[in-house]
Amino acid sequence: MIKIFPTDKVKELDQYTIQNEPISSIDLVERASTVFVHEFCRRYSKQTRIIVFAGQGNNGADALAIARLLKDECYKVETYLFNPTEHLSFDCEMNKQRILGLEKVEFTEVIADFVPPVLTDRDVVIDGLFGSGLNRPITGGFAAMVKYINQSDATVVSIDIPSGLFGENNQTNDPDSIIKASLTLTFGFPKLAFFFPENAQYVGEWKVLDIGIHPDIVDNTSTPYMMVEEEDIAEVLQPREKFSHKGTYGHALLIAGSKGKMGAALLAARSCLRSGTGLLTVHIPQRGEVIMQAAFPEAMISFDPHPDYFTTVPEIASYSAVGIGPGLGQHLESAAALERLLQTTEKPVVLDADALNLLASNKDLLNRIPPRSILTPHPKEFDRIAGESNTMYERLKKTQAFATEHKLCVILKGTYTAICTATGNVYFNSCGNPGMATAGSGDVLTGIILGLLAQGAEPETASVAGVFLHGTAGDLAAVYRSEESMIAGDITDMLGKAFKQIK
């Protein structure tokens, strides 16, 4: 896991590293800048004109060090240091003196009036005006500079974080005073703000650079936010026992499908078995028999008395996990049957799609969901349950509170799907692609999670691993099919390769 620290903790991590490595703050700046330049040189040719804009603080110190190191690498660099108060941080002042010690340096310190350089589509701007410690919107001349950069055709690379972007909550920020970067090279750890769609236009592509923060302080500093990596999932996918049998790997019950929506039941059923569960029974309306039996002979079938939709809860004692929702429909009888299911089982239940819509219409049912159950809403489904949010940050906070209050896992689906646990932790998924934004993709995810849960995985583990497997299979499908041509079944088809890649 990669930890995601609040910005007020980052300074503590730096200070501990300085005191206990030990290393001076100026040398830590040099180390971070060296790593930045190494990555920059991999991406941009030495024929590129580089314009560095540095602020007065430590982000400006990084920018000045980067400008000097790029000049050492034979780039053509123009550097502008904005110092309207004529007061620089210690590290910024030190790096100013270092850059002035170079021969034939193009360096301008801006204190009052400033005529900015002409920026073209062949130029790269390195943004080092403000760092992650910013807590109020940029105003005045700095805001004018941000707007000038954003209106240009230049490529923008931000140091650590785009200038003007707050590290977490940007609800009170001025969207017109935030740098729109093409690339953000961030130091040490991702910033929480990078995971929210409303900030994508500012952050662009982003990459974390390891600058050698002391491992002791990283290990001993808690944070509820983490980003999942492939190696984390490899640790929880256990090899199968030689003398095992189908009963060893659980028996899942999937309640899904209604007239006109049997495809959702099929997608969830296939992905459930493809994720490794030993047995699967699908509870479907009577008219779905031919579709299910013909398309998916590996599944057993439990029939609802109603021909078209879910009205009756089957006996569930013999099942190791229950999932409900894909293609279920929102009939009154289905709502009543869902209530009976939640009242009569103590097993964790995976709730998705129409099961979530029924919960939104009958909020009294929320308190009847068995503890450790898993909800898999997309943002609008969650809003219908918990109320609308103006930003993804606000929605995430609501999801965290909801998960802890109801003792559930809530999987808030999106580009960086957030798995919010009953203990308040949030795990951001790091794989997947826009090709997965296709009908039925969520049904596939429900089946994967149900399959892992049926095999005995803890709900938190099933949620985190299921989302990662889903994303990995989606990435493999995109390579094979292209993002444009992907359909949900392609994700299921790539689950086997996803398991192989991760294990």
Image: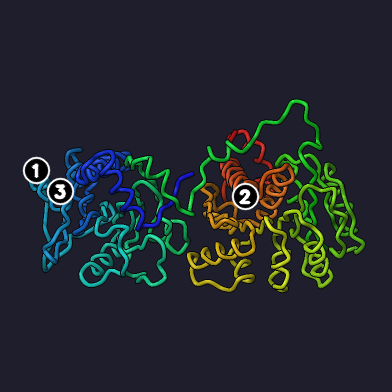
384 vs 107, left or right, is: right
Marker count (numbered): 3
434 vs 222, left or right, is: right
Q: Is mark 2 on a helix, strand or loop?
A: helix
At label 1, counting other C-alpha atoms closer than 10 Å, the crowd grade (few under 14, some 14-19, many 20 or more) is few
The Cα atoms of the two marked residues, 1 and 3, are separated by 11 Å
Location of residue 163 in the rendering, given as x and y in whole percent from the top left corner: 30, 60
Q: What element carries label 3?
A: helix
Residue 46 figure quarter: top left
At label 2, counting other C-alpha atoms closer than 10 Å, the crowd grade (few under 14, some 14-19, many 20 or more) is many
Amino acid at pointer 3: Asn
What residue is shown with label 1?
102
Q: Who's the residue at 81% across and 42% down the image?
A: 279
The answer to whether the residue labelled 3 contacts the one labelled 2, judged by CB atoms less than 8 Å apart, is no
160 vs 205, left or right, is: left
What residue is shown with label 3?
95
The circle drawn on residue 460 is 2
Q: Is mark 1 on a helix, strand or loop?
A: loop
